[in-house]
Image (cartoon, coloured by chain):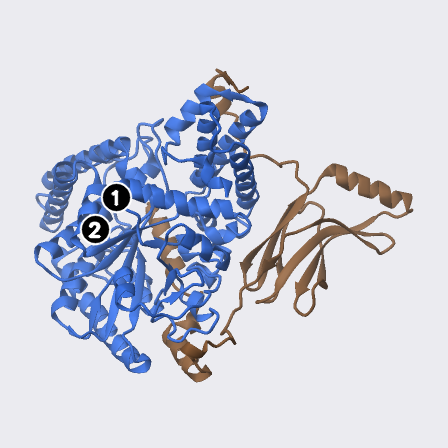
Chain colours: A brown, B blue
């Protein structure tokens, strides 16, 4: 079933390239931080062509490309916003709220004003930035106590640690730049 | 000793897998050689000295699977000896050249003795394999070895690909077990990157404890009773320790921290750049570009270009003072917390191991002074490993830590921004394909060529996932090298994928890849079938 072949190592090694695409039709959502999501996508030219034909049959055209952002809470499927895309983009960052669930559609607003989804993303949840309101009775920690330990735990400097600055210095030093 | 609390120092030793048999000299391989010379061997010396003198101490040392693999690699071991030989020869010449300059001559002698000692320890004592050294330290009971993700993949950005997360955990643990003969209790999450979706996978991989940044605990739910000063259990019973930012700052920060002291060695002034080119030519990079040698004659001095000669004894006395200051601050911190909490707090102080020695040259000596002072100059606290702490204090709160990392701003921005976001569509696709192929070609599949190909694809995927590449793209140093590595691993995976799909495998190409990207020799692609 599987054949072993003997092509030139070097000629094949020279063909090591990063694929331009994978022939997929999808949009993927990932969390960067509590306030920012990143979406990337690859859309099938064939699917887009069919959509354009469908619009044409209805005497409409592509108005604009958008990402439609759905947010929960307050309610499942609530549209948070539409983000207009430029034509050449294949990924986008957009602001969101912490402690919320999101998914997006990428699609077209046609010239007649209707929305046509071309692909829907996975769901993601942004982390809560702040104290949990859930209290474990056995490990009760009231607000005042929490904030005191929060301060002692360095909570007011979250994310501002000097770690990255130092690590960058370190890397530059590894680069031996005199 | 009736301690009011505990200090757990955790050193995370990691370098990306860099091995280029196709080149006689390769600049980025120096990362390993410099780290062995300036960090790993000095730390091993410090720990052995403490054991020799019966100083009670505890430290946790995380060894990444890529580092473990490089330390075991005979090509890299031999190249390191060659590197040491060059340094010994260079410093021998320096001893002669500096005869009329006593302040530099004594430093040339210092470096010559140091490199000669390194060679003696590396070659004769440990037979070129530092895994032996670390295994002996573990046996002493003072050092607790743990590991991390197979290639230091940043896990929060693999949220939708649990099979890839599982592989990073499992292959990492397997690599450690193969090297040391036991599975570690602890696991360092690469970049402290925790995602709640992964806590069950940590448990399934047999991990008993791990670490998160402070806000991973502070923003956990339910609300943590003791902040970061007591471990918590995740719902799957993995213990989680929170990083203490106060202890971090004093060592990490170039502004507020100890390493910026004027007495300490200046990193940038290296004779590789300072001395005559023709004189240095035999000791610098094969392509003729000037590189650092590790021989540095100046101290930080201050914010001036006019640097003064390094004075070793002065630097060591400052390291002792800084150790005293660090200990004093911990005494005060622990006494205060003990009163507040009503139970002994644990302060978890994790550092990149390579910062001690390589970046902060006197770091290993600082650690040496620190452990000795803690043992004899105070009675407030003891050092401990997380494993020991959990034995002493079994009852801890259960909660779900929050998504977090120790990166800038505390989340994933360092590894996901305009400079490196293009990587993820490839890493995700490779994960998806690896998972599909592992399911398609079940364990019983008998075709050895297919198995070899799928195993190599797993290696290429893992190597592409190193968080180091995204980090380098962000910071802008060594960018070409990071791009090259990503292009190679993504491209090689793609080539092999196409061969599997077309059912036509080029065996010579496969053998070539197995010889150059040779990490995790006994990997089983079935780890991706989950």
Residue B94 shows up from this direction = no
Q: Name the secondary structure under disc 1.
A: helix
How many numbered circles does the render carry? 2
Q: Please determine whether, in this image, residue B194 is positioned above or below residue B44.
A: below
Marks 2/1 same chain: yes
Q: Please determine whether, in this image, residue A25 is positioned above or below residue B10.
A: above
Q: Is residue B78 left or right of residue B461?
A: left
Residue B170, percent across and down?
40, 45
Which one is nearer the viewer's eye here, B170 or B120? Answer: B170
Q: Residue at x 18, y 50 (%)?
A: B139
Q: Is residue A99 left or right of residue A110?
A: left
Residue at the outermost front position: B444
Residue B205, percent across and down?
40, 50
Residue at the outermost bottom position: A144
| Quarter residue A165 falls in | bottom left
Q: Chain of mark 2?
A: B
Q: Name the secondary structure under disc 2.
A: helix
Q: Are marks 2 and 1 in contact (CB under 8 Å)?
A: yes
| Quarter residue B188 falls in | bottom left
Q: Chain of mark 1?
A: B
Residue B515, percent across and down?
37, 27
Which one is nearer the viewer's eye here, B529 or B455? Answer: B529
Q: Which mark is residue B202?
A: none
Residue B138, percent across and down?
21, 51
Q: Read off the residue under disc 1.
A: B180
Q: Read off the residue under disc 2.
A: B138
Q: Residue at x 39, y 71 (%)?
A: B397
Give neighbour class at mark 1: few <14, some 14-19, many 20+ (Cα, 10 Å): some
């Amino acid at each position: 079933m599987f054949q072993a072949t003997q092509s030139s190592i070097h000629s094949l090694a020279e063909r090591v390239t990063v694929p331009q695409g994978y022939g997929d039709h999808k949009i993927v959502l990932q969390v960067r931080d509590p306030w920012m999501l990143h979406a990337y996508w690859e859309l099938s030219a064939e699917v887009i062509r069919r959509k354009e034909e469908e619009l044409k049959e209805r005497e409409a055209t592509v108005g604009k490309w958008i990402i439609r952002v759905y947010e929960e809470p307050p309610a499942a499927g609530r549209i948070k916003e539409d983000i207009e895309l430029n034509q050449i983009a294949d990924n986008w960052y957009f602001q969101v709220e912490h402690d919320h669930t999101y998914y997006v559609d990428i699609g077209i607003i046609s010239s007649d004003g209707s929305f046509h989804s071309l692909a829907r993303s996975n769901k993601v949840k942004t982390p809560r930035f702040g104290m949990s309101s859930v209290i474990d009775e056995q490990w009760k920690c009231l607000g005042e106590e929490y904030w005191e330990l929060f301060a002692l735990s360095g909570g007011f400097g979250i994310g501002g640690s000097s770690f990255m600055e130092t690590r960058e210095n370190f890397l530059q030093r590894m680069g031996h730049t005199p | 000793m009736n301690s009011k609390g505990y200090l757990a120092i955790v050193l995370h030793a990691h370098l990306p897998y860099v091995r280029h048999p196709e080149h006689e000299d390769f600049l980025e391989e120096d990362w390993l050689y410099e780290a062995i010379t300036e960090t790993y061997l000095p730390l091993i010396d410090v720990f052995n000295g403490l054991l020799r003198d019966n100083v009670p101490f505890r430290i946790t040392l995380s060894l990444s699977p890529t580092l473990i693999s490089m330390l075991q690699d005979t090509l890299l071991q031999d190249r390191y000896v060659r590197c040491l030989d060059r340094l010994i020869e260079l410093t021998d010449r320096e001893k002669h050249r500096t005869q009329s300059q006593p302040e530099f001559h004594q430093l040339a002698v210092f470096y010559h003795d140091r490199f000669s000692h390194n060679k003696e320890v590396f070659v004769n004592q440990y037979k070129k394999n530092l895994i032996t050294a670390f295994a002996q330290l573990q046996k002493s009971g003072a050092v607790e070895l743990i590991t991390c993700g197979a290639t230091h993949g940043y896990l929060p950005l693999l949220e939708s690909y649990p099979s890839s997360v599982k592989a990073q955990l499992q292959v990492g643990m397997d690599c450690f077990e193969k090297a040391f003969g036991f599975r570690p209790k602890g696991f360092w999450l690469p970049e402290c990157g925790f995602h709640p979706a992964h806590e069950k996978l940590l448990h399934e991989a047999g991990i008993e404890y791990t670490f998160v940044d402070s806000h991973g605990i502070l923003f956990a739910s339910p609300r943590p009773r003791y902040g970061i000063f007591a471990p918590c259990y995740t719902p799957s019973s993995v213990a989680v320790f929170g990083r203490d930012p106060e202890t971090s700052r004093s060592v990490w920060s170039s502004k507020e921290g100890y390493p910026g002291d004027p007495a300490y060695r200046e990193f940038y002034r290296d004779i590789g750049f300072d001395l005559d080119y023709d004189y240095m030519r035999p000791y610098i990079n094969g392509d003729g570009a000037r590189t650092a040698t590790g021989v540095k004659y100046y101290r930080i001095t201050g914010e001036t270009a006019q640097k003064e000669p390094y004075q070793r004894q002065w630097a060591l006395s400052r390291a002792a003072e800084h150790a005293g200051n660090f200990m004093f601050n911990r005494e005060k911190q622990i006494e205060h917390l003990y009163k507040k909490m009503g139970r002994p707090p644990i302060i978890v102080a994790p550092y990149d191991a390579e910062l001690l020695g390589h970046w902060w040259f006197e770091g290993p000596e600082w650690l040496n002074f620190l452990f000795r002072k803690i043992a004899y100059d105070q009675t407030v606290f003891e050092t401990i490993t997380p494993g020991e702490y959990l034995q002493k204090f079994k009852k801890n709160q259960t909660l779900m830590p929050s998504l977090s990392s120790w990166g800038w701003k505390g989340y994933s921005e360092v590894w996901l921004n305009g400079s490196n976001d293009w990587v993820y569509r490839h890493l995700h696709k490779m994960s998806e394909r690896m998972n599909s192929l592992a399911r398609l070609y079940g364990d019983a599949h008998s075709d050895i060529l297919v198995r070899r190909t799928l195993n190599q694809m797993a290696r290429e995927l893992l190597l592409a996932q190193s968080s180091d590449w995204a980090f380098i793209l962000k910071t802008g140093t060594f960018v070409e090298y990071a791009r090259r590595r990503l292009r190679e691993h993504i491209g090689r995976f793609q080539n092999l994928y196409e061969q599997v799909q077309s059912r036509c495998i080029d065996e010579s190409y496969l053998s070539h890849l197995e010889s150059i990207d040779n990490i995790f020799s006994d990997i089983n692609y079935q780890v991706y079938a989950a």
